[in-house]
Image (cartoon, rainbow, N blue to C red):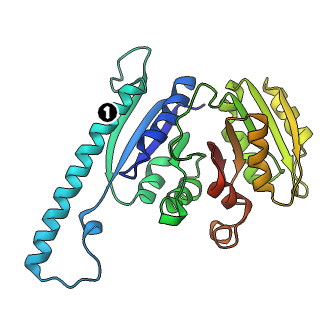
Amino acid sequence: MLKSILVPVRGDGMVATVLAHAAELARQHYAQVNVVHCRAQANDLMPQGIPLNDFAKKVMMEQAVELANRQEDHLRGVLHRLARDFGLSEDVSEDGKVVCTFTEEQGRMAEVVKHAGRLSDLIVLPKPQRERNLGQSSLKSALYGAGRPVLICPPLLQPDATFAQHVAVGWNGSLPAARAVASSLDIVHAAKRVSILTGGKVQAHGPTVEELVAYYALRGVTAEVVTFDGKDPAKELLATCKNIGASLLVTGAYSHSHETEMLFGGNTQRIVDSTEMPVLMAH
């Protein structure tokens, strides 16, 4: 059951996007949203590679702590305002409201995601920005370290009324694809329309798309099959989602190692880099 949604945040300008998507899913499934602010450590704010005497180090450390405190206070204020805007309640005793909790943890975001994510049903992250080297380690930590499904939210995208109402499921019979299917059953069951997208190379000895249709039917879900062609499955998968009007893509992640796909551009990495729609991934 989808009852616990983790939203790790920091001052990267993506707070509203990830919280909006989490809030919408929380309302649909009456889940709790747990926002964790990854507080920057003072040492990480210190200049690197510059020799400093003890007095200068002390002064700069105090300034770094003050800066971290200001950032934390500002972000907490933003989060409280956004929670109200998105209809979330911070009062666990308030009936009929979706609850949102706020906590702060020291450490790098990837470490916080690994720790807090293992007892979450879903982790919501912003789309990684490779050009800024931002977000890749958090995605890797969520999929590999926490072992949980991840909802990736593109920038500048607020969910509308169609979000998660037409779910497209990418299927190639692989183990990651099967885990993505299992991890998204609540979301798929609540959708108004489900499309199974298949094309490209199907994994040998993996379940067929017809078997997936039967798997869903046993759980009361009627799914249509949409096939696509092309030499670039990632590109065709995203294009097909757009053509059929899907508002959420569910897919397996990183059949090969994360590092291999980063270096050589596997299908998962191309989806992450190119998507303009929310994508739910599981490894």
**Residue furthest out toward the left:** 55
Judging depth in this view, the residue of 92 and 81 nearest the camera is 81
Q: Image height check: is 40 above or below 186?
A: below
- Amino acid type for the residue under numbered disc 1: His
Quadrant holding the C terminus? bottom right
Regarding mark 1 in the picture, which secondary structure is present there? Answer: helix
Q: Position of residue 259 (x, y in %)?
A: 62, 70
Q: Does residue 89 show up?
A: no
Q: Position of residue 277 (x, y in %)?
A: 63, 43
Query: Which residue position is annotated with label 1?
Result: 80
Q: Position of residue 77 (x, y in %)?
A: 27, 37
Judging depth in this view, the residue of 194 and 216 nearest the camera is 194
Question: Crowding at label 1, few (<14), some or many (≥20) Cα neighbours within 10 Å?
Answer: some
Q: Image height check: is 100 above or below 124?
A: above
Q: Does residue 96 show up?
A: yes
The residue shown at (67%, 38%) is 248
Q: Decide if residue 204 is on the left or right side of residue 47.
A: right
